Image (cartoon, rainbow, N blue to C red):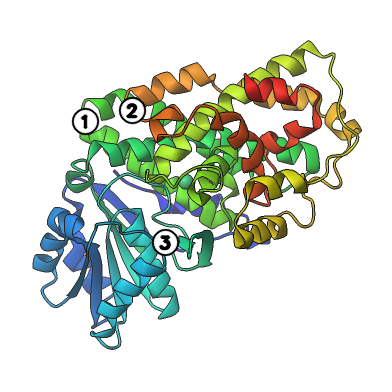
Amino acid sequence: MNVDLQKVRELCDPSRDQKIFVDDIIIEKGALKHLPSIMKEKYGQFKNVVMICDQNTYEAAGKKVEQLLPAIHTVILDPTDLHANEIGVAAAEKELNQYGDVDFMIACGSGTIHDITRYHAYNRKINFLSIPTAASVDGFVSTVAAMTWHGFKKSFTAVSPVFVLADSEIFSHAPARLTASGVGDLIGKYTSICDWKIAHAVTGEYISMPVVEWEQEILKDLIDNLDGIGKHDFKAYENLMYGLLLSGLAMQMIGNSRPASGAEHHCSHLWEMAAINEPIDFLHGEKVGVGLCLVSAVYKRALAKLKEGNYTVKSHMDVETDFIKEHFKNETLQKAILEENTPNLMADITADQLKAKEAEIITILEELPSAEQIIGWMKKVNALTTIEELTLDESLRPLTLKLSPYVRQRLTFMRLLKFYDFYDEVIEG
Ligand SMILES: [Zn+2]
């Protein structure tokens, strides 16, 4: 599958300094065989190359990489409880240090391995090449490392890989759960885009319509290929990987995660903070996918209320400080959340503004597929769709929806809903 990065570059707005950092992407069956020529022709100046993988991804692809590049050093991490956190970073660092002045890295694995690698590549001011072993997340080409640092979710400035070599022979054989997680992360763009459009309509926040249209095409392709993923068709897997990588490039271009993360991701981040729930151990896309199912149901109920008319809107909406303090009991976390919400993201939003934008908001919400439709699509790949499947009690659903908008300084429709008198009703469902 050919990825035309020139076409992607043309979507960049130079006046906003938008750019992508990836030289090239190859997605095909047997792509790995190109590795020696790529390393020789493009990165031949680098002599001390280290690959980071874990025991599973070493078996899946790392072994083959060693055969293709006999001179490289390999760091094999223990996959048990391996996360993109201070422990995973330290484990890789210890191994890396024994190889002296490393001048290039290869990340061979899924999201965690990539985040650990990009963290070290950034600190060492070196480049890395990506070999994704599962179509599990859209973060492979991210420029930030999404980490949990001493229990708190944190994004570190890091680097994108300069090259992505995605071999469908490898990633189509990843555990089905990882692929379903990739579907969850990508299909979550339905509400990310919806939130971005509504925020733009209400506040005039910057939006790139070429990027939005491009993401809508990616979503359409994803839906068309879900049956193929269920049937284990190579092309459908390649299409999913393509969508995930393009979604990552959209974030690179815009310079933040706005195109790919909205209210559905906020649910996931809240659960990861374990403020209202016991810690859960699920994949990123599994949590995002469930978030999407919950959020889209609320948005559609709100749409019905907006269309009915006959509602009132608060004149202003303060940050619910007491509500935040009540549920974020951990002092460090509470402080971080309160800081995140200073200043109040909605301070300048008025009832008149929301009323004036009603028709536009309705149109955007009408474009969103229904929760039932989304759940039907996700079930084709056996993705998780309910909060109970994440081992969380159903009683946490309304609280998740009310509290999660505070985990990030980013305007979503879920946050704006706090203005409307039908808020509780549409949240409870
Ligand atoms: Zn995501």
Q: CA distance from mark 2 to mark 3?
A: 26 Å
In the picture provided, is 111 more to the left or to the right than 299?
left
Q: Residue at x 36, y 68 (%)?
A: 87
Q: Which mark is residue 233?
A: 1
Mark 3, residue position: 22
> Does residue 337 lie above or below 129 as drawn?
above
Quick one: label 3, few (<14), some, or many (20+) residues within 10 Å? some
Q: Given the current orientation, which residue lies at the most extreme bottom position?
A: 100
Type of amino acid at the residue the image marks with label 1: Asp
In the picture provided, is 31 more to the left or to the right than 86?
left
Type of amino acid at the residue the image marks with label 3: Val
Q: Nearer the viewer, residue 258 or 345?
A: 345
Quick one: label 1, few (<14), some, or many (20+) residues within 10 Å? some
CB-based contact (under 8 Å), mark 1 and mark 2: yes
**Sooner in the amino-acid sequence: mark 2 or mark 3:** 3
Mark 2, residue position: 225
Indicate the position of residue 153 as horizontal and vertical percent values.
Answer: 52, 58
Which of discs 3 and 1 lies nearer the camera? The answer is 1
